[in-house]
Image (spheres, rainbow, N blue to C red):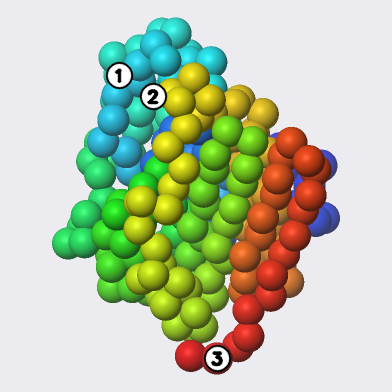
């Protein structure tokens, strides 16, 4: 694939990324990273594509019934032919031995799952970890330099799933929020690649248009 149009901004070919969760955020993000030219993409998801996923996730009608990890692998190879994709049809648990990559991104929908992923991430020791979260029209991402993790660890320890609003199933997801989330993640990966990313929390209220970045102090 010819990367001429963005190679002067970033070169992702030597960077590897692990992406955990291939739903509303993760499916768009997988394609975004592949188009950016990441040299290696490792994806994890234990779910299968359902009809209800089609309007709000980057999956096709022909993917219904297929493991999401395989569906994304096949989709990526239709759009980007120079990325090595390794797909795992499984959920990440505390004991999961993640493939070592430069960046690990979680795109799951529960605090309990994030805590299990974090335990696996700490053992793997990537350079950066991105914890991305989405509601219907709201996106938040914890951007963690693995040399400065205490703030994130303390925050996650004090969170639980009871704090997540229990919205009706008809108000849980929008296709445009997933697409914007993937854009934010792609831009963050670009800043990591070019050495310009700071550790902190990015918040975007899609409905109101309010965008905020909270810089975290460099202390362990």
Which residue corresponds to the image point at 48% horizontal and 90% vertical from the top-left?
A: 220
Q: Which residue: 61% across, 25% down?
A: 175
Write down the quadrant of residue 143 in the picture: bottom right
Q: Secondary structure at mark 3?
A: loop
Residue 199 visible in the picture: yes
Work out whether residue 35 can be spotted.
no
Give the residue at the far left of this rendering.
Answer: 95
What is the distance, in whole Å, between disc 1 and disc 3 at their CAs?
44 Å
Q: Position of residue 11 (x, y in %)?
A: 69, 56
Q: Are the residues at dot 1 and dot 3 in contact (C-beta closer than 8 Å)?
A: no
Residue at image mark 1: 66
Residue 24 is left or right of residue 161, and the answer is right
For the point 22% across and 55% down, the residue is 93
Q: Point out residue 48 in the picture as x, y percentages from the top left corner.
A: 29, 24
First of labels 2, 3 by sequence position:
2
Q: Nearer the viewer, mark 2 or mark 3?
A: 3
Q: How many marks?
A: 3
Q: Earlier in the sequence, mark 1 or mark 3?
A: 1
The answer to whether mark 2 and mark 3 are in CB contact below 8 A is no
Residues 86 and 81: in front is: 86
Q: CA distance from mark 2 to mark 1?
A: 6 Å
In the rendered view, does 190 fall on the left or right side of 220? right
Q: Which residue is mark 3?
A: 219
- The residue tagged 2 is 71
* Distance from Cα at disc 2 to Cα at disc 3: 41 Å
Instruction: Residue at 54% x, 43% y: name it.
Output: 134
Instruction: Kindly state the secondary structure of the residue where label 1 is placed.
Output: loop
* Nearer the observer, 97 or 108: 108
| Residue 14 screen position, x and y as percent | 56, 60
**Label 3 crowd (10 A; few <14 / some 14-19 / many >=20):** few
Q: Residue furthest top?
A: 61
């Amino acid at each position: 694939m010819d990367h001429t149009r963005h190679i002067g901004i970033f070169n992702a070919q030597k960077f590897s990324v692990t992406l955990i969760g291939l739903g509303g955020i993760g499916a768009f993000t997988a394609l975004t990273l592949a188009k950016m030219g990441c040299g290696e993409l490792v994806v994890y998801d234990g779910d299968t594509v359902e009809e209800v996923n089609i309007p709000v996730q980057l999956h096709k009608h022909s993917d219904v019934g297929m493991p999401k990890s395989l569906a994304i692998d096949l989709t990526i190879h239709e759009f980007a032919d120079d990325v090595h994709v390794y797909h795992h049809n499984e959920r990440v648990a505390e004991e999961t031995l993640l493939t070592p990559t430069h960046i690990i991104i979680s795109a799951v929908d529960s605090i309990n799952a994030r805590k299990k992923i974090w335990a696996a991430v700490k053992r793997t020791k990537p350079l950066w970890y991105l914890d991305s979260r989405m509601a219907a029209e709201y996106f938040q991402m914890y951007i963690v330099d693995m040399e400065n993790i205490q703030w994130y660890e303390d925050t996650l320890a004090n969170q639980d799933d009871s704090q997540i609003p229990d919205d009706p199933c008809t108000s849980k997801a929008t296709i445009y929020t997933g697409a914007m989330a993937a854009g934010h993640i792609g831009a963050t990966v670009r800043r990591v690649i070019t050495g310009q990313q700071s550790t902190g929390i990015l918040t975007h209220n899609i409905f109101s248009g309010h965008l905020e970045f909270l810089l975290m102090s460099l202390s362990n």
